[in-house]
Image (cartoon, helix red, strand yellow):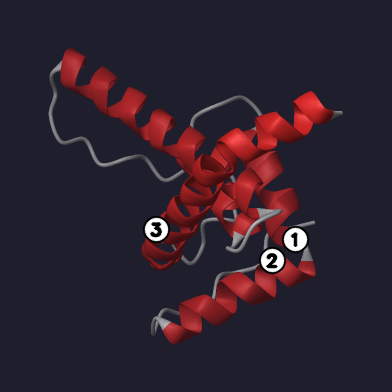
Amino acid sequence: MQMWLDYLQAYAGWFVIFSLLSFVIGLISTPFLVARIPVDYFSHHKRHAMADASHHVVIGWLLACLKNLFGTVLVLVGIIMLVTPGQGLLSILFGLMIMNYPGKYRLECWIIRQPVIFRTVNGLREKLDQPPLQAPPD
Protein backbone atom coordinates (compact mmCIF):
# COMPACT_ATOMS: atom_id res chain seq x y z
CA MET A 1 0.00 0.00 0.00
CA GLN A 2 2.80 2.42 0.86
CA MET A 3 4.47 1.73 -2.47
CA TRP A 4 1.23 2.68 -4.26
CA LEU A 5 0.97 5.95 -2.28
CA ASP A 6 4.60 6.79 -3.05
CA TYR A 7 3.93 6.17 -6.73
CA LEU A 8 0.89 8.46 -6.69
CA GLN A 9 2.82 11.20 -4.91
CA ALA A 10 5.67 10.99 -7.39
CA TYR A 11 3.39 11.42 -10.40
CA ALA A 12 0.67 13.68 -8.96
CA GLY A 13 2.18 16.78 -10.57
CA TRP A 14 2.23 15.13 -13.99
CA PHE A 15 -1.36 14.00 -13.53
CA VAL A 16 -2.44 17.58 -12.73
CA ILE A 17 -0.54 18.98 -15.72
CA PHE A 18 -2.00 16.34 -18.05
CA SER A 19 -5.48 16.95 -16.65
CA LEU A 20 -5.23 20.70 -17.21
CA LEU A 21 -3.78 20.20 -20.68
CA SER A 22 -6.58 17.83 -21.66
CA PHE A 23 -9.14 20.29 -20.30
CA VAL A 24 -7.69 23.12 -22.42
CA ILE A 25 -7.51 20.91 -25.54
CA GLY A 26 -11.14 19.96 -25.03
CA LEU A 27 -12.25 23.55 -24.55
CA ILE A 28 -10.45 24.67 -27.69
CA SER A 29 -11.32 21.78 -30.01
CA THR A 30 -14.93 21.08 -29.02
CA PRO A 31 -16.55 24.29 -30.33
CA PHE A 32 -14.53 24.11 -33.55
CA LEU A 33 -15.58 20.51 -34.17
CA VAL A 34 -19.23 21.04 -33.21
CA ALA A 35 -19.54 23.91 -35.69
CA ARG A 36 -18.03 21.80 -38.49
CA ILE A 37 -20.53 18.91 -38.27
CA PRO A 38 -22.86 19.04 -41.30
CA VAL A 39 -26.52 19.42 -40.27
CA ASP A 40 -27.47 16.15 -42.00
CA TYR A 41 -24.42 14.15 -40.85
CA PHE A 42 -26.51 11.69 -38.80
CA SER A 43 -29.68 11.66 -40.92
CA HIS A 44 -28.52 9.35 -43.74
CA HIS A 45 -25.89 6.76 -44.56
CA LYS A 46 -24.18 8.87 -47.23
CA ARG A 47 -20.79 9.76 -45.82
CA HIS A 48 -19.22 13.18 -46.19
CA ALA A 49 -15.82 12.73 -47.82
CA MET A 50 -12.81 14.56 -46.44
CA ALA A 51 -11.71 17.35 -48.76
CA ASP A 52 -8.85 16.13 -50.92
CA ALA A 53 -6.03 18.69 -50.62
CA SER A 54 -3.82 16.83 -53.05
CA HIS A 55 -4.05 13.97 -55.48
CA HIS A 56 -0.70 12.57 -54.42
CA VAL A 57 -1.05 9.21 -52.67
CA VAL A 58 1.62 9.86 -50.03
CA ILE A 59 0.08 13.18 -48.96
CA GLY A 60 -3.38 11.61 -48.80
CA TRP A 61 -2.04 8.74 -46.70
CA LEU A 62 -0.20 11.16 -44.40
CA LEU A 63 -3.34 13.29 -43.93
CA ALA A 64 -5.40 10.18 -43.13
CA CYS A 65 -2.81 9.09 -40.54
CA LEU A 66 -2.76 12.54 -38.95
CA LYS A 67 -6.56 12.63 -38.88
CA ASN A 68 -6.72 9.24 -37.16
CA LEU A 69 -3.97 10.24 -34.72
CA PHE A 70 -5.82 13.44 -33.79
CA GLY A 71 -9.05 11.45 -33.34
CA THR A 72 -7.27 8.97 -31.09
CA VAL A 73 -5.87 11.80 -28.97
CA LEU A 74 -9.36 13.28 -28.62
CA VAL A 75 -10.80 9.93 -27.54
CA LEU A 76 -8.05 9.42 -24.95
CA VAL A 77 -8.38 12.99 -23.66
CA GLY A 78 -12.17 12.50 -23.50
CA ILE A 79 -11.75 9.34 -21.43
CA ILE A 80 -9.53 11.26 -19.03
CA MET A 81 -12.07 14.10 -18.90
CA LEU A 82 -14.73 11.64 -17.76
CA VAL A 83 -13.05 11.74 -14.34
CA THR A 84 -11.49 15.23 -14.54
CA PRO A 85 -12.97 18.61 -15.51
CA GLY A 86 -14.01 18.90 -19.14
CA GLN A 87 -16.44 17.69 -21.77
CA GLY A 88 -15.40 14.06 -21.88
CA LEU A 89 -18.33 12.56 -23.78
CA LEU A 90 -18.26 15.25 -26.44
CA SER A 91 -14.50 14.86 -26.91
CA ILE A 92 -14.92 11.10 -27.29
CA LEU A 93 -17.74 11.62 -29.82
CA PHE A 94 -15.70 14.04 -31.92
CA GLY A 95 -12.61 11.84 -31.77
CA LEU A 96 -14.69 8.90 -33.00
CA MET A 97 -16.19 11.06 -35.76
CA ILE A 98 -12.75 12.06 -37.04
CA MET A 99 -11.25 8.57 -37.20
CA ASN A 100 -11.85 5.86 -39.81
CA TYR A 101 -12.88 2.40 -38.58
CA PRO A 102 -15.50 -0.30 -39.31
CA GLY A 103 -18.92 0.33 -37.74
CA LYS A 104 -18.21 4.03 -37.30
CA TYR A 105 -21.62 5.28 -38.46
CA ARG A 106 -23.60 2.92 -36.19
CA LEU A 107 -21.51 3.90 -33.16
CA GLU A 108 -21.82 7.62 -33.88
CA CYS A 109 -25.59 7.33 -34.27
CA TRP A 110 -25.89 5.37 -31.02
CA ILE A 111 -23.90 8.03 -29.16
CA ILE A 112 -25.76 11.01 -30.65
CA ARG A 113 -29.14 9.35 -29.93
CA GLN A 114 -28.42 9.71 -26.22
CA PRO A 115 -30.71 12.61 -25.25
CA VAL A 116 -28.14 14.43 -23.11
CA ILE A 117 -25.52 14.29 -25.88
CA PHE A 118 -27.96 15.42 -28.58
CA ARG A 119 -29.22 18.34 -26.47
CA THR A 120 -25.67 19.37 -25.53
CA VAL A 121 -24.39 19.30 -29.10
CA ASN A 122 -27.37 21.25 -30.43
CA GLY A 123 -27.12 23.73 -27.53
CA LEU A 124 -23.49 24.35 -28.36
CA ARG A 125 -24.35 24.71 -32.06
CA GLU A 126 -26.98 27.30 -31.14
CA LYS A 127 -24.38 29.32 -29.22
CA LEU A 128 -22.14 29.17 -32.31
CA ASP A 129 -24.99 30.40 -34.57
CA GLN A 130 -25.18 27.04 -36.37
CA PRO A 131 -28.45 25.24 -37.23
CA PRO A 132 -29.28 22.21 -35.05
CA LEU A 133 -28.34 18.72 -36.19
CA GLN A 134 -31.00 16.49 -37.69
CA ALA A 135 -31.74 13.48 -35.49
CA PRO A 136 -30.47 10.12 -36.77
CA PRO A 137 -33.07 7.62 -37.97
CA ASP A 138 -34.05 4.80 -35.60
State the residue in front, 90 or 52. Answer: 90
Mark-to-mark CA distance, 3 and 2: 17 Å
State the residue in front, 95 or 136. Answer: 95
Which mark is on residue 29? 3
**Which residue is outermost to the top?**
58
Which mark is on residue 113? 1
Report x, y in % for residue 1.
87, 28
Total numbered circles: 3
State the residue in front, 42 or 85. Answer: 85
From the viewer's perspective, tell me whether residue 113 is left or right of residue 105: right
Q: Earlier in the sequence, mark 3 or mark 1?
A: 3
- Contact between marks 1 and 2 (CB within 8 A): the answer is yes
Report x, y in % for residue 78.
59, 49
Q: Earlier in the sequence, mark 3 or mark 2?
A: 3
Q: Amino acid at mark 3?
A: Ser
Q: Name the front one of labels 3 and 2.
A: 3
Mark-to-mark CA distance, 1 and 2: 7 Å
Q: Amino acid at mark 1?
A: Arg
Q: Relative to 19, say whether 87 is above or below.
A: below
Residue at the spot 47% in from the left edge and 58% down from the top edge: 26
Residue at the spot 46% in from the left edge and 49% down from the top edge: 17
Q: Relative to 3, say whether 107 is above or below.
A: below
Q: Which residue is mark 2?
A: 117
Q: How many residues crowd around disc 3 within 10 Å: few (fewer than 14), some, or many (20 or more)?
A: few
Report x, y in % for residue 96.
56, 41
Q: Secondary structure at mark 2?
A: helix
- Contact between marks 3 and 2 (CB within 8 A): the answer is no
Residue at the spot 68% in from the left edge and 36% down from the top edge: 8
